[in-house]
Amino acid sequence: MAGFGDVVKKAFYLGVGVASYAGEKAGDTFKDLREQSQTLVNELVARGEITAEEAQRLVNDMVNRAQNTAANSTSTTDNLPQPRPIEILDDDTPSVADAQTEALRTQVAALRQELENLKRKSSS
């Protein structure tokens, strides 16, 4: 069973690694978006098409929309069905179901014996 524990530990570390990598990529994506939008807005300011205040507001709006979209897509995955928990049973220890099964078998055996006794009495 020590091998199973190692597998579980490795799976856990893999999950943490994937989550960390996804977080870094998301941060890089927002950083790239901010840089691209800032470049675009700087060009518009240089041409005189918008003011610096409007440019800053525009960049902030773009980034906020992108973050809200990302947050909404994350909350959508929270609504997905979760994996079913697995219960590991130990075969060495008797369970409640085993005790109930044995009690029912004993009861059935007693009823059969009683039925046989009744058949013998009625045939005599």
Image: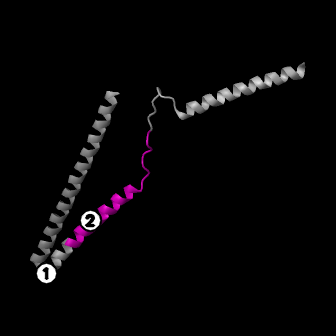
Of the numbered discs 1 and 2, the one sitting upstream in the chain is 1
Going 26% across and 65% down the picture, which residue do you hit?
A: 66
Q: Is residue 22 magenta?
A: no
Using residue 110 as the reference point, say whether residue 64 is left or right of it.
Answer: left
Label placed on residue 51: 1
Going 57% across and 31% down the picture, which residue do you hit?
A: 99
Q: For label 2, count other residues whose C-alpha is less than 10 Å away and answer few (under 14), some (14-19) or many (20+).
A: some
- From the viewer's side, name the closer residue of 118 and 65: 118
Q: Find out whether the residues at labels 1 and 2 contact each other: C-beta distance under 8 Å.
A: no
Going 45% across and 30% down the picture, which residue do you hit?
A: 90
Q: For residue 16, what is the image quadrant?
A: top left
Q: Where is residue 115 in the image (x, y as percent from the top left)?
A: 79, 25
Going 15% across and 64% down the picture, which residue do you hit?
A: 35
Using residue 111 as the reference point, say whether residue 9 is left or right of it.
Answer: left
Reply above or below: 82 against 36: above
Instruction: Name the amino acid, label 1.
Output: Thr
Q: Which residue lies furthest to the right in this view?
A: 124
Using residue 33 as the reference point, say whether residue 3 is left or right of it.
Answer: right
- Image quarter hosting the C terminus: top right
Asked whether residue 49 is in view, the answer is no
- From the viewer's side, name the closer residue of 41 and 84: 84
Magenta extent = 60-86
| Number of residue marks | 2
Q: Is mark 2 on a helix, strand or loop?
A: helix
- Image quarter hosting the N terminus: top left
Q: For label 1, count other residues whose C-alpha is less than 10 Å away and answer few (under 14), some (14-19) or many (20+).
A: some
Q: Is residue 71 magenta?
A: yes
